[in-house]
Amino acid sequence: MEQPQSEKFEKDAAKSPLIVVGVDGSDDGLRAVRFGANTAREFGGELMLVHAVDDAMLAGAWGVVYDPEVLQNAGVTANLQAKGLALELGLPEDRVRTEVVLGSPGGVLGRLSEVADLIVLGRRSVSGLERMFVGSTSVSVVTNSSCPVLVISAAAHPIDVGGKKLIGVGMNTSPGNHATLEVAFRQARRFQSSLEIVHALQPPIGIFSKKLSPDDLQEQLRYIRGGIEAIAKSIAERYPEVPYKVVVVADSPINELVGRTPNYDALVLGISNGGFGLGGLVRGLMAHAECPLLITH
């Protein structure tokens, strides 16, 4: 029976976690390397640095054919730079591997997710209109991964893993969100952090939407809070060392969650089985979150 994704990347004395980082030579990619190396160092894991040589590039645009050896050498150079950073951060050399693999980055990382405990990647996009969109590699990996994926957006600048001592988790009211909350508690325990459980209720908008009175809105918020607190209490019994609080507000989910991300070491999101789905909210957070996103199925 396949191990549930939500149970992967659990510190186990019998098995060191394998953390795979996508390397492309960019500053965004190096931020991912930094996070992956720090995580591997903290939890006794092995770091695999992977550069994918996209086979579509071999017959490039306008009929230009790229030299496979040139692309291979570029990948080796990017991996050496990434490995140097990992070693500078204190990860022993015998726990760092590098690979240059032929294939699309999304496909390569998707296949590696079957044996990895965590995939880490940087989302390349810088400013302005570019930050409104999420790259195809990020979407492909998050959608198809068999293990949790940690995405570091162009807006995030993680330095120390677990330095803020606060993990966030975005919750909705679907019955299947228990697994996402379990991952969040596990992540908070791993980093010896507190947990903030956030639900943002979008008030009705538009001229044809039925408006809620202030009393009705507060009643709805109390009802949602009660449901989330009941779920959290049942899971928290297994994590007595993790302090947590539940935050339920009336606001746009994207505004509320993005606004809170500067305070978090990571924001946990689920995208299936009761999660948000890979829609506008998750894509917006992938573009604008100021902390890493841990996305799980």
Image: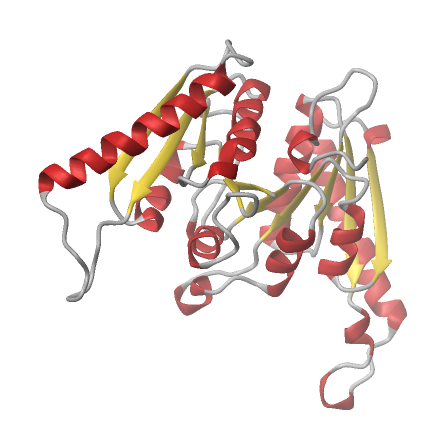
Q: Residue furthest bottom?
A: 62
> Which residue is pictured at 43% across the width and 59% down the height?
280
Residue at image location 47% in from the left, 40% down from the top: 291
Point out residue 232 in the picture as x, y percentages from the top left corner: 44, 23
- Residue 112 rendering spot, x and y as whole percentages: 80, 47
Q: Find the residue positioned furthest to the top.
A: 240
| Quadrant of the image occupied by residue 82 | top right
Residue located farthest toward the right when viewing the structure as drawn: 69
| Closer to the camera in the image, 270 or 243 | 270
Is 280 located above or below residue 68 in the figure? Answer: above
The answer to whether residue 238 shows anywhere in this view is yes
- Residue 267 visible in the shown view: no
Residue under the image location 82 percent in, 23 percent down: 15
- What quarter of the picture does the N terminus occupy? top right
Vertical placement of residue 202 versus 260, above or below: below
Quarter where residue 62 is shown? bottom right
Residue 262 vertical position relative to residue 165 in the rendered view, above or below:
below
Find residue 262 and report its horizontal and vertical position in percent: 38, 37
Task: Measuring from the top left, give residue 123's x and y in whole percent.
Answer: 57, 55
Residue at (48% x, 60% y) in the render: 126
Quadrant including the C terminus: top right
* 82 relative position to 283: left or right: right
Determine the image quadrant of residue 71. bottom right
